[in-house]
């Protein structure tokens, strides 16, 4: 059984200069492809159930699917709740067996975010799990605007919450379909100088791969959340499968043909972040 907590995989990543990807899960095929990729690469991996995934599949079912894969894997697998917006979201996930929770109070005033996040961290630690928090607002491509993380506020946030990982806003954007401009490295360096908490970049699909690799190797960022580029790989594989055999109607046959391409995309992410071979 190799179910791991976020702290258990991020600590070694920071010490040895690599990052662990938080891969966004939407269904059985992508979950399985991610674990297959991690095992092929001998790499740790974080399986993330975000709000969209939870709206589609009940949390208890997701927990059993993710833990089934994690418990059978030969590499460390974190079962992570992404973007919980209320303490009850985290409580429910921990009760179902998630080993890590992310509480998102980023849109709250600073003290309210600290209070909510500290309560979530206490819950997680009491359950033997980990907690990620967010300070600053990470916006969406074509949607809500970002608000950059203030380094002094980040230091206070990390110190007063007891979190195991801290998501920051340094030019990263959710749901970006192609690599954007470079992150705000000056802001990231200022945050890094004021806290020892492992840093997380949400919206990792929009960060150029060479910069992802550099930030991982330097220890500046130990977790990148990757979703959009994997969904794009799934969509392209699905369209290709249907185009090759328009008469095919069996969903198992159709969906099974997405796993190879999604696995290949996950392997590329693991290698780029330097995670390959770290679970050997």
Image (cartoon, grey):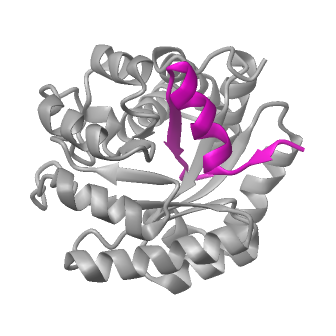
Q: Which stretch appears magenta?
A: 1-28
Q: Quadrant of residue 180?
A: top left
Magenta span contains residue 236: no
User: Is 91 or 174 nearer to us in this picture?
Assistant: 91
Image point (67%, 48%), residue name: 78
Left or right of 106, for residue 269: right
Q: Is residue 122 above or below residue 184?
A: below
Residue 237: x and y in percent read 49, 28
**Which image quarter is the C terminus in?**
top right
Residue 54: x and y in percent read 53, 69
Image point (27%, 38%), residue name: 193
Residue 243: x and y in percent read 46, 27
User: Is 128 or 34 nearer to us in this picture?
Assistant: 128
Q: Is residue 82 above or below residue 219?
A: below
Magenta span contains residue 7: yes
| Observer able to see residue 139 | no
Q: Is residue 111 above or below residue 81?
A: below
Left or right of 50, for residue 210: left
Residue 264: x and y in percent read 56, 19
């Amino acid at each position: 059984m190799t179910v791991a907590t976020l702290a258990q995989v991020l600590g070694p990543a920071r010490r040895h200069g690599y990052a662990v990807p938080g891969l966004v899960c939407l269904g059985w095929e992508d979950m399985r492809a991610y674990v297959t990729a991690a095992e092929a690469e001998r790499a740790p991996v974080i399986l993330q159930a975000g709000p969209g995934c939870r709206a589609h599949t009940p949390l208890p079912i997701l927990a059993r699917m993710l833990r089934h894969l994690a418990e059978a894997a030969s590499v460390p697998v974190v079962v992570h709740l992404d973007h919980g917006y209320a303490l009850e979201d985290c409580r429910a996930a921990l009760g179902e067996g998630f080993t890590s929770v992310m509480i998102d109070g980023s849109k709250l005033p600073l003290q309210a975010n600290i209070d909510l996040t500290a309560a979530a961290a206490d819950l997680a630690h009491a359950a033997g799990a980990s907690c990620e928090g967010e300070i600053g607002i990470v916006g969406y491509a074509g949607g809500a605007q970002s608000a950059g993380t203030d380094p002094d506020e980040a230091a206070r946030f990390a110190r007063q919450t007891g979190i195991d990982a801290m998501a920051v806003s340094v030019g990263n954007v959710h749901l970006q379909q192609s690599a954007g401009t470079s992150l705000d490295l000056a802001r990231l360096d200022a945050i890094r100088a004021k806290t020892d908490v492992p840093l997380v970049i949400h919206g990792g699909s929009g960060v150029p791969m060479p910069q992802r690799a550099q930030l991982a190797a330097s220890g500046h960022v130990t977790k990148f959340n990757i979703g959009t580029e994997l969904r794009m790989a799934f969509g392209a594989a699905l369209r290709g499968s249907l185009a090759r055999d328009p008469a095919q109607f069996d969903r198992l046959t159709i969906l099974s043909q997405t796993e190879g391409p999604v696995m290949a995309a996950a392997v590329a992410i693991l290698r780029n972040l330097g995670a390959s071979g770290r679970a050997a």
